Amino acid sequence: MGGMPMIAQTEPLVPSIGWSVLHLFVKARGAVDCDIVHDAKDVLEKAGGQVVTAAILGHKADACVMALSEDLWDLRRLQTEIERSGLEVTESYVSLTELSEYSQGVPEQMREARLHPKLPPEGLRAFCFYPMSKRRGEIHNWFSLPYDARKELMMAHGKSGRAFAGRILQVITGSTGLDDFEWGVTLFGGTPDDIKECVYTMRFDEASALYAEFGPFYTGIVGTVDEVLGTLSR
Amino acid sequence: MGGMPMIAQTEPLVPSIGWSVLHLFVKARGAVDCDIVHDAKDVLEKAGGQVVTAAILGHKADACVMALSEDLWDLRRLQTEIERSGLEVTESYVSLTELSEYSQGVPEQMREARLHPKLPPEGLRAFCFYPMSKRRGEIHNWFSLPYDARKELMMAHGKSGRAFAGRILQVITGSTGLDDFEWGVTLFGGTPDDIKECVYTMRFDEASALYAEFGPFYTGIVGTVDEVLGTLSR
Amino acid sequence: MGGMPMIAQTEPLVPSIGWSVLHLFVKARGAVDCDIVHDAKDVLEKAGGQVVTAAILGHKADACVMALSEDLWDLRRLQTEIERSGLEVTESYVSLTELSEYSQGVPEQMREARLHPKLPPEGLRAFCFYPMSKRRGEIHNWFSLPYDARKELMMAHGKSGRAFAGRILQVITGSTGLDDFEWGVTLFGGTPDDIKECVYTMRFDEASALYAEFGPFYTGIVGTVDEVLGTLSR
Amino acid sequence: MGGMPMIAQTEPLVPSIGWSVLHLFVKARGAVDCDIVHDAKDVLEKAGGQVVTAAILGHKADACVMALSEDLWDLRRLQTEIERSGLEVTESYVSLTELSEYSQGVPEQMREARLHPKLPPEGLRAFCFYPMSKRRGEIHNWFSLPYDARKELMMAHGKSGRAFAGRILQVITGSTGLDDFEWGVTLFGGTPDDIKECVYTMRFDEASALYAEFGPFYTGIVGTVDEVLGTLSR
Amino acid sequence: MGGMPMIAQTEPLVPSIGWSVLHLFVKARGAVDCDIVHDAKDVLEKAGGQVVTAAILGHKADACVMALSEDLWDLRRLQTEIERSGLEVTESYVSLTELSEYSQGVPEQMREARLHPKLPPEGLRAFCFYPMSKRRGEIHNWFSLPYDARKELMMAHGKSGRAFAGRILQVITGSTGLDDFEWGVTLFGGTPDDIKECVYTMRFDEASALYAEFGPFYTGIVGTVDEVLGTLSR
């Protein structure tokens, strides 16, 4: 860059609770420098963050790089490095780990699992991401329901999801005010049909049937950086 | 790729039932290396998969490569090879063959035809693909209907479709949680107007009239790799 | 193309009634080889097809190439040739000429005019294309109306359109199951305001006011290949 | 162009009443040849047409070229010249000047101002364009209202607009059947907040509150060709 | 540019009250000349304007340049300079600072803070921008509500927002008639979760639950030009 200064030391910007999360969906248009991707992952992990990589099927993306970190600047620098490696960021999602308003009193272990998840989970290699919002329709409007009604619907929805414990790990991160939908949902499953069955089953829950709006779905396979980039090698 | 490792041996990721399906819609922007396409098809078929190719009309795509396989990694590698041949993937669909919740008790032969279809069908060369979801409207909401009502609507819809037996083969694959719509519909017809008449007729079924939402439609002609790529030759 | 075979002789794929129709909307990004366009038109016409060319105004396209043919392969080959000439296909529409379910008993001459129109009509040089579907709203749903109600609405709509006889030729082709809307409407008018007045007037018909959904509109001028490409010459 | 004929002499295609109007929204991707733009403007003006140029703010466009002419071919040729100058047409609108069905009996001077406006107006340099349609909702449907109800609503809406006389000149051109919306609205204002206040105030009129659907808004500053292109000079 | 004149001296076009505001969302596709960005900022500030820069996360943009100025021409020239530096403007928003119709009688200091804000605020480095409109639904229509009902809803909404005083600075600029939504909302927060909590909480206010429609959300970090561009350096 003309007149480009050294990368300034930036003062960290961290959430007061939980972690910042950045899903990057990338395409390999030309040559990719895998070393840069490895290095960017190492840098974030040394700073206490985590990076999950997954191969993605179809035209939306070739791969997903899901990064968790305290400092937003660290995520922004990771994105710059990913792009510098030759991967183009075609879609993305910005969110924060959170404890929902309905889960404030959960046990410490569950609280920790939501605010500081350890990813990816062992043995659940089928990967899925989609964003969602609660409907604000002219008849069915989630935001006009009283808290107790919302809590009851969410408890029933949660129970429906727990039937898939062990087969599906669900990571829900909050994005109201941060990205176009209100939540990002990252699913890790044992098989692709575990993910399909889980989402299909839960779609009949009233919380979802009447009140959920879904964004695009991204499907793939969790793998190491070498596995994921290796299958893109042209 | 800089520092690109050899393509790692990946552990297969297969559905517990049925096959993984990937529809790739591609454009020939420049020169296309047909040998790479032939090789990719051979590799998948040797691994037990299937590949259907169709020429597509209009701006959305020049061709469709529909691939069925057990292992998601095999489909991802096929996609990489297709792109390496010079074809650009402009649209796609990710789904799984399935036995719907309304068809659990069908005879073994029908069950097998849905989970492990043999494609393309003989003599049905008119090709059509579109994705669809069931409506979750504020008044008409499929996911709020009881199971029996849904089953009755689907039985009537199925009967309406069976009037086209022999003229149309319908392959419905499930994609809830995997792609943007809930099902992918691939039609093989004797003539283009068989497809039009079938879809038009079924649109008046209550299951479709009140409860279906359709995505984009892709129309073309099933052909060999040489026929399909040959007509794109510039 | 690497390993590209000669263009294979393909077995024709023709509708059992009427013609296949392909509207190509194209942009001239760089140099255009007019001879290729002339040749492609000649080839299709010798095979019994027709090609109408129109200059289009605005950013959506520089020109429209509307082709009618029995064989879908012929239309696909025409598209390849158009692209080979240097024109980029940016939008398109795939449909079939048809006799609607409400017009099955029309006189032979009218039947023939709909299934095998002779285009472009003499003296009607203002050109317009748009796709449309019948509404499947939660309150107003065309596909839930009984046949007699639909027929009555269509008869009134047709009468409204016949007031423009001589000033407007309307070519309606069916695309349910073939493209994103259910019909393509191609209008040929004496003047641009004939088209505006006709569409505006018919929009108040109940069949249209309550039950029509419109796609994008393309406006232009019918001309010879030389006139149309000549005005794009840079 | 290979085999490119001289630009054919084309037979004019003119509306039977009023003028043809083309709004071109353009971006300067690289070098722009201003002489070509000047020449294209001169050619159209010598043929009796008008050209208004405005700098546009934001990503949608760098400038607007609004051209009025009798002959559609003249507008198409202007578009080709604008593109030949190095400006890319990224958005556009096609319409006709008109006397609405509610204004058939207006005085000759007002009739003339609508069919043959003199643009740009003196001293009103704030520029705005947006397209709009009347709503065809399931409950509120403009096209199901009787003529008298529509006329009354439009009269009240017009009165509301006339409060801005002198501060805003509103040019409404009809595009039903010609472009994606039913009307194009071009506003010329004394200041940017005149435009904001006018549109905001009129949005509460019942004709607009219940029955208007708006497309994208383009905002800028009327200037000479040199002023507009000069501020884009890189 | 061929035949490019010197940049003409332009007559300022300023709002009669408040400032013009331009949000530019930019991507660094290749090399960026930081000196040009510094100079453009200096020029605007010397003319009495302000420029806020923020790094943005995700695919929508790499950075935001938010500029406030009296003269629209100054903002347009800033945009040209930003693009000349090598940054591509991929999204944007055009608006004006304003005193809403519900706040006409506020104290002078608050009035001044809205019409002539001093940005960025000290210590609030989490950045968010989104545009919004009031709903014009078929059942819930903001523009059909009487003034008093609207004012009451806005007062309650404002009170809800004031609970975040000190943690969030909210800058609301008006864009009815200027850009696609009716308001632009720029939030400056102490932490990313302050922004999330504020927007989430206010979404349950009736003014928002029943009557707000939101556009895309952009999230980032306020920084100096060197900090922001430095983290994009490839």
Image: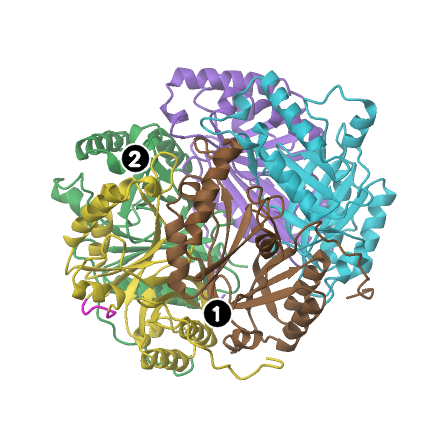
Chain colours: A green, B purple, C cyan, D brown, E yellow
Task: Kindly indicate the quadrant of the structure image that contains residue B112.
Answer: top right
Amino acid type of the residue tagged 1 in the rendering: Gly
Nearer the observer, disc 1 or disc 2?
Answer: 1
Q: Chain of mark 2?
A: A
Q: With E186 as the anchor, is A29 left or right in this view?
A: right
Q: Pointer 2: what residue? A: A141
Is A3 on the left or on the right of A107, as rendered? right
Measured from the top left, where is residue D153 in percent x and y? 45, 40
Q: Is E119 part of what is drawn in magenta?
A: yes
Identity of the residue drawn at 37% across and 51% down: D201
> Which of the labelled discs sits on residue D123, or is there none?
1
The reply to whether dot 1 and dot 2 touch (C-beta < 8 Å) is no
Q: Which residues are magenta?
A: E118-123
Q: Is A106 included in the stretch rendered in magenta?
A: no
- Residue B22 location in percent, x, y? 53, 41
Of E12 and D82, nearer the camera is E12
Relative to residue A4, is residue D138 depicted above or below? above
Q: Residues within 10 Å of mark 1 (few under 14, many from 20)?
A: few
From this view, report whether residue B218 is shown above or below residue D17. Answer: above
Q: Amino acid at mark 2?
A: Asn
Establish whether labels 1 and 2 are both on one chain.
no
Seen at 51% across and 74% down, the residue is D232
